[in-house]
Image (spheres, rainbow, N blue to C red):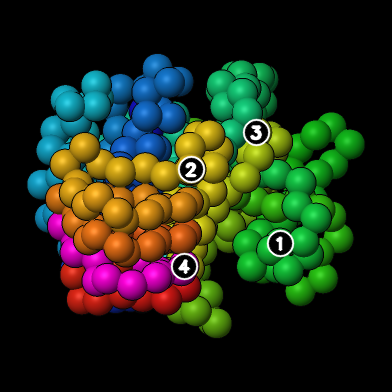
Amino acid sequence: MGVLLAAGKGTRIRPFSDTLPKPLLPVLGRPLLVWQIDAMVALGIRDITIVIGHLGHQIVQTLGDGSAFGVRLSYVEQDRMLGIAHAVGQLERGVDRPFLLFLGDIFFETRDLGSLLTRFRQPGVHAVLAVKREPSAEAIRRNFTVEIDAQGFVRRVIEKPRHPKTDIKGCGLYLFDPAIFDAIRRTPRTALRDEYELTDAIQIFIEYGYGVVAAEVVEDDLNLSTPKDLLDLNLHVLAKSGRSMLVDPEALVESGARLERSVVGRGARVPQGAVLESCLVLPGVSVPAGHHQRRIFAADGPVDC
C-alpha cells in the first residue's frame, strides 16, 4: 500500500498555503499529490492513505475516493503538527502490511523505482530509504544522510548533519515494514524542534536489530517550500516535457499576448499585449497588461520570484 503525508501548514510558501494545502498546488496544471499517486499506480499500488491536516477537507474534496485516478483513497487526520514520525504514527491502527511513503511536498524524479520493492524483498531487510548522490553539502545539511556498513546496511541516520561525511542525501521517500510503528512509539521529541523526527525512529529501528538499506533510485527531489520553488518546479517540469509553454484548454490567451516558458492554468486570462516570461498563472486568475518576468499570478495579486 501507499502513504502520502499532506498535513503540514506550509508557512514558507504563503500566501498560497493560506487558501490551499501545499500538496494541492499545481505542477503543469495537476496537483502535486496527483503526480505522486501516478507514481504509485505505476508500481501497481492501488490502496493509498493520505495523512491530512491543514485545510485537509480540500484534499478530500479534490481527490475524493480516488476512483478518478484508478486507486482507493482513505484519509487519516493529524490533528497536531508534531513532526513526520508523529504523522506516520497516526496510521498504526489501519496499516498491517509494508507501505511506500512519500512526503507530500516533494516532486520526485526517479529511476527504476521498482528496485525499491526488490531491495525490500531481500532477506533481512525491513526498510528501504530512497537516497541520491548530492554534490552540495548544504543540501545534505538541510536533510539527512546515512552511514552504510560493508554489508550494505544502514548503521546511522543523521538528521541535518553539520559536517556531512558522505555525498548521500535522504530524499523523503521510504518503504517500511509495519514494525516501524513500534520504533515510532518509542521515539522521543527532539529538544530543538519539539517534534518527533522520522530519522530518530529509523535509528531506533536499526538499534532494535531491523535491517535498513538505502537505494539510489532518486535522480532529483524538488522540495516545494517557497513561492520560488513553486515557479521553478513548474518551469523545470515544463522544460523536461519539451514544451516552451503550457496553456490549459479552458484558459483564454487573447490575440497579441506573448508567452515564453510560462504555464497558464484553467480559467485564467492573459490579455492582448501582455508578455509573460517564465511565469505561472494559477487557475481562474486574470493577468494585468504589461511585461512580466518570473512571477506567479494568484487571486490576491502577483508574487515576484
Residue labelled with disc 1: 140
In three-dimensional space, the C-alpha distance between marks 1 and 2, rounded to whole angstroms, equals 32 Å
Circle number at residue 121? none
Ranked by sequence position, the earlier of labels 4 and 3 is 3
Report the mark closest to the observer, 4 or 3: 4
Query: What is the C-alpha distance between the residues marked 4 and 3?
Result: 31 Å
Of pointers 2 and 4, the one earlier in the residue sequence: 2
Judge left or right: residue 170 versus residue 176: right
Q: Which residue is mark 2?
A: 244
Q: Is residue 102 above or below residue 273?
A: above
Q: Tell me where the magenta segment starts and ends, as one range.
A: 284-296
Question: Considering only order in the chain, which callout, 3 or 2, is on the residue closer to the N terminus?
Answer: 3
Residue 122 on image: x %, y % = 66, 19
N-term mark: 1 or 4: 1
Identify the amino acid type marked 4. Arg
Q: Do the numbered discs 2 and 3 sit on residues whose CB atoms are within 8 Å?
A: no
Q: Are marks 1 and 4 in contact (CB under 8 Å)?
A: no
Spatial CA distance of label 2 from label 3 is 28 Å
Marks 2 and 4, how far apart at CA = 15 Å
Separation (CA) of disc 1 from disc 4? 27 Å
The tag on residue 217 is: 3
Q: Under tag 1, what secondary structure?
A: helix
- The local crowd at label 4, few if under 14, some if 14 to 19, many if 20 or more residues have their Cα within 10 Å, is many
Asked if the residues shown at circle 4 and circle 3 are in contact, with their CB atoms under 8 angstroms apart, the answer is no
Front of the two marks 2 and 3: 2
Mark 1 or mark 2, which has the lower sequence index?
1
Please state which of residues 214 and 276 is positioned toward the viewer in this rendering.
276
Q: Which residue is mark 4?
A: 294
> How many numbered marks have been drawn onto this rendered protein structure?
4
Question: Residue type at mark 2?
Answer: Ser
